[in-house]
Image (cartoon, rainbow, N blue to C red):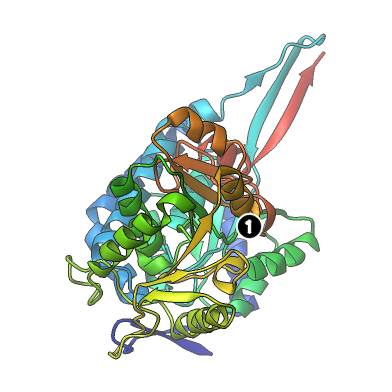
């Protein structure tokens, strides 16, 4: 069987791909197992050197990779270029710091010698999404590779080239054969991968996908790392710098056409400044240029898939029935491609666009009566990935951050992943962490060694 990818800006077909069946997956698993036996014994200095080489290779090929990202999922080209540069930065970070991060940890005990050793798990299988097709893969693969694991990656069927085949080729240019393989296909391919003889599973995707993958993996008690959805609050306190927080809110909500797990999905504004915030936010949103994602001046391209657009319309319609008021936009653009207007709505936290993860350019503004009310609203969600709070008082912002139940809180900055900091969520936003030492340690066997 085959599937065809579609350019979301033109609705034209791009390419056709074979769907990998269970036999094809199992064959790649055998290759990976053989590669692991050699790769696990490779000195970490050599692994680090090759990872840095991959970072340089990504920069050299960034235009090719960026254009493929834009063609397959509609992200403005300038954002696709930034994504490939971030991939390179992740490789550089772990290439530089892996030896220190994985160094044996000596422990003082009553025995002659005691230490903790960090050793690779084996084959790490991953199921990756389409919204950041390259960086999501590199974010998990770079620390996993440098730790001595080998990878089998099933990219989204929306982005099999930019999220799979191109990355596979770039890794092959730098690393030994079969330490990184892409497995192209659909959900049945993903199921075959999780049920195969791999040792750990990493997934970035929806809550529903995460629950399904976790259930499959648990049949064999495989290690699972899940980075799932979010409904991140963007909280504006009354003493915030209005111009800076509005600029941050527009970027935080409409970057990647709003298709980001860490997007500012609920704008929670203290009552006394709400009118001023709405006015400035709508003004800034109106200035966004929506159009051809290959043009560098474009701020927002199409949604990645027609089903995404239909789902967003359903969520918006449900919220309007519940009392939401559309302040700007609210409908698809009458042109080819899966375009949707940048949309602003006045809402409450009980409405569908706030309770569910709205994966698109819809910004609900919620009014909070007080700082305490803002904390209550921010935490009243099934998700707990990230949050940002805006205030001119840093001490106040830090105290506020401690009250938010999420994996990350940024004060006067938008939420983003950073290789120097662990990334992940609480509640239905996932299990485990990626990046930094904490993410790296998810990819290893933490072994206690006692010598008497």
Q: Residue at coordinates 48% horizontally, 53% vertically from top-left?
A: 271
Q: Secondary structure at mark 1?
A: loop
Does residue 198 appear left or right of residue 166 in this picture? right
The foreground one among 433 and 141 is 433
Is 163 in front, or is 258? 258
**Is residue 49 shown above or below 351?**
above
- Choose between 358 and 88: the one closer to the eye: 358
Q: Residue furthest front?
A: 272
Residue 165 in the image: state x and y as whole percent: 40, 68
Quarter of the image where one finds residue 293? bottom left
Q: Position of residue 164 (x, y in %)?
A: 43, 66
Look at the picture and state if 148 lies above or below 131.
above
Residue lying at 63% horizontally and 67% vertically, measured from the top left: 350
Q: Give the position of the C terminus as an image quadrant.
A: top right
Query: Residue 14 location, x and y as percent?
Result: 33, 84
Q: With respect to residue 243, does 421 lie above or below? A: above
Residue 166 visible? The answer is no
The quarter of the picture where the N terminus appears is: bottom right
Badge 1: residue crowd in 10 Å (few <14, some 14–19, many ≥20)? many
Residue name at image x 35 percent, y 40 percent: 52
Left/right placement of residue 433 relative to residue 159 reads: right
- Look at mark 1 in the image and give the residue it sits on: 383
Residue 135 vs residue 378: left or right? left
Q: Residue at x 37, y 61 (%)?
A: 278
Q: How many marks?
A: 1
Instruction: Please say whether residue 69 is visible from this viewpoint.
Output: yes
């Amino acid at each position: 069987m085959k599937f065809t990818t579609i350019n979301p800006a033109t609705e034209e077909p791009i390419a056709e791909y074979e769907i990998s069946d269970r036999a094809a997956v199992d064959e790649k698993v055998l290759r990976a197992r053989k590669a692991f036996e050699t790769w696990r014994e490779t000195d970490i200095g050599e692994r680090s050197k090759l990872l840095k080489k991959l970072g340089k290779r990504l920069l050299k090929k960034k235009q090719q990779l960026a254009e493929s990202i834009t063609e397959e999922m509609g992200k403005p080209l300038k954002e696709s270029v930034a994504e490939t540069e971030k991939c390179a930065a992740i490789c550089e970070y772990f290439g530089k710091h892996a030896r220190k991060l994985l160094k044996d940890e000596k422990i003082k005990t009553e025995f002659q010698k005691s230490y903790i050793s960090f050793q690779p798990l084996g084959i790490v299988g991953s199921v990756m999404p389409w919204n950041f097709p390259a960086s999501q893969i590199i974010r998990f693969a770079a620390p996993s590779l440098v730790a001595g694991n080998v990878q089998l990656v099933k990219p989204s069927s929306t982005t099999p080239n930019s999220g799979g085949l191109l990355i596979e080729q770039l890794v092959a240019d730098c690393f030994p054969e079969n330490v990184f393989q892409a497995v192209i296909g659909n959900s049945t391919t993903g199921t075959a991968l999780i049920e195969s003889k791999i040792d750990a599973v990493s997934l970035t995707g929806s809550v529903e996908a995460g629950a399904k993958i976790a259930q499959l993996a648990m049949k064999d008690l495989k290690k699972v790392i899940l980075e799932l959805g979010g409904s991140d609050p963007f909280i504006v306190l009354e003493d915030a710098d209005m111009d800076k927080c509005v600029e941050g809110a527009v970027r935080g909500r409409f970057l990647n056409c709003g298709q980001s797990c860490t997007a500012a999905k609920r704008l929670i504004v203290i009552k006394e400044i709400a009118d001023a915030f709405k006015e400035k936010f709508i003004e800034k949103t109106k200035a966004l240029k929506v159009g051809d994602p290959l043009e560098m001046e474009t701020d927002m391209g199409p949604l990645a898939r027609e089903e995404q657009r239909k789902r967003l319309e359903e969520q918006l319609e449900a919220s309007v029935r519940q009392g939401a008021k559309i302040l700007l936009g609210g409908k698809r653009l009458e042109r080819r491609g899966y375009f949707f207007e940048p949309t602003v709505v006045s809402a409450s936290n009980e409405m569908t666009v706030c309770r569910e993860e709205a994966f698109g350019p819809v910004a609900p503004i919620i009014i909070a009566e007080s700082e305490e009310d803002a904390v209550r609203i921010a935490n009243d969600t099934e998700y707990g990935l990230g949050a940002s709070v805006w205030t001119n008082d840093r001490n106040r912002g830090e105290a506020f951050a401690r009250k938010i139940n999420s994996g990350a809180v940024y004060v006067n900055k938008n939420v983003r992943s950073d290789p120097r900091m662990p990334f992940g969520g609480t509640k239905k936003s996932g299990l485990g962490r990626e990046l930094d030492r904490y993410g790296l340690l998810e990819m290893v066997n933490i072994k206690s060694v006692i010598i008497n």
